[in-house]
Image: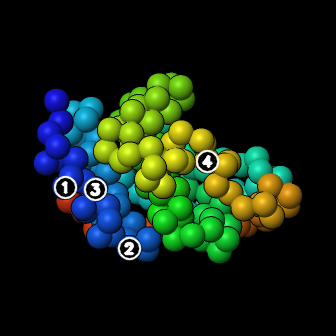
């Protein structure tokens, strides 16, 4: 059983992090997953890649099975950053990283991963917190209207050239593919 003190520590650490601090968010997620699921995956490489979107339909991120690679949809992140509050952008980023990190720990089934992401998020954050709201109402409920009305199709070059984020954490100091 996780203690109230641990939950408070996770909440305080999350609150102190900036939306640009991928390493800090990832470090927190590693600790959370280790505590809740007793699992960890060293050497994660995080890439941002243009995956586009089509009238609200999109892939937020993915973990390449059998690798240490996690990718987030740069197109969707850009829309969230530009058109929603910083609180919801940060919640969205946390949610994606948590979900994909759980996948990287050999939880392949999408439903199971979604359920674990939801359970962990709601155990730490209330249903009134942006992460709780996003978890309950779904990712699509917080994307801006224009995102649901527009389409962005990246070029092939954009799709095959991810931007890698340096994760400054002991679990990510060595990498392999």
Q: Which residue is mark 4?
A: 139
Residue at the image point whose x is 29% and y is 41% from the top: 33
Judging depth in this view, the residue of 76 and 155 nearest the camera is 76
Q: Residues within 10 Å of mark 1 (few under 14, many from 20)?
A: few
Q: Residues within 10 Å of mark 2 (few under 14, many from 20)?
A: few
Residue 83 placement (x, y as % from top left): 67, 71
Pointer 3 and pointer 1: residues touching (CB < 8 Å)?
Answer: yes
**Distance (Cα) linking label 3 and label 2:** 13 Å
Query: Is 13 left, or right, of 146 in this rendering?
Result: left
Judging depth in this view, the residue of 165 and 120 nearest the camera is 120
Q: On the rendered image, what quadrant is the N terminus found in?
A: top left
Q: Which residue is mark 3?
A: 11
Q: Which residue is mark 2?
A: 18
Q: Nearer the viewer, mark 3 or mark 2?
A: 3
Judging depth in this view, the residue of 3 and 65 nearest the camera is 3
Pointer 3 and pointer 4: residues touching (CB < 8 Å)?
Answer: no
**Distance (Cα) linking label 4 and label 2:** 20 Å
Of helix, strand and loop, which one carries label 2? loop
**In this view, 16 is above or below 102:** below
Residue at the image point whose x is 39% and y is 39% from the top: 122
Of helix, strand and loop, which one carries label 4? helix
Pointer 4 and pointer 2: residues touching (CB < 8 Å)?
Answer: no
- Which numbered disc, 4 or 1, marks the residue that appears first in the sequence? 1
Q: Which residue is mark 1?
A: 9
- Which numbered disc, 3 or 4, marks the residue that appears first in the sequence? 3
Can residue 166 be seen?
Answer: no
Residue 137 placement (x, y as % from top left): 59, 41
Q: Nearer the viewer, mark 1 or mark 2?
A: 1
Of helix, strand and loop, which one carries label 3? helix
Judging depth in this view, the residue of 116 and 153 nearest the camera is 116
Of helix, strand and loop, which one carries label 1? helix
């Amino acid at each position: 059983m996780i203690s109230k003190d641990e939950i408070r520590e996770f909440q305080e650490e999350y609150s102190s992090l900036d939306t640009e601090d991928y390493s800090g968010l990832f470090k927190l997620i590693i600790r959370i997953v280790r505590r809740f699921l007793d699992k960890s995956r060293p050497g994660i490489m995080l890439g941002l890649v243009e995956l586009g979107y089509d009238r609200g339909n999109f892939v937020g991120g993915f973990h390449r099975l059998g690798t240490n690679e996690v990718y987030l949809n740069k197109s969707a992140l850009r829309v969230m950053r530009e058109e929603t509050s910083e609180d919801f952008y940060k919640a969205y980023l946390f949610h994606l990283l948590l979900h994909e990190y759980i996948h990287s720990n050999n939880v392949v089934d999408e439903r199971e991963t979604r359920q674990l992401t939801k359970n962990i998020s709601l155990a730490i954050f209330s249903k009134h917190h942006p992460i709780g709201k996003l978890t309950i109402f779904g990712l699509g409920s917080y994307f801006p209207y224009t995102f649901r009305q527009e389409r962005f199709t990246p070029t092939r070059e954009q799709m095959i050239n991810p931007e890698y984020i340096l994760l400054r954490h002991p679990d990510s100091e060595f990498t392999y593919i």
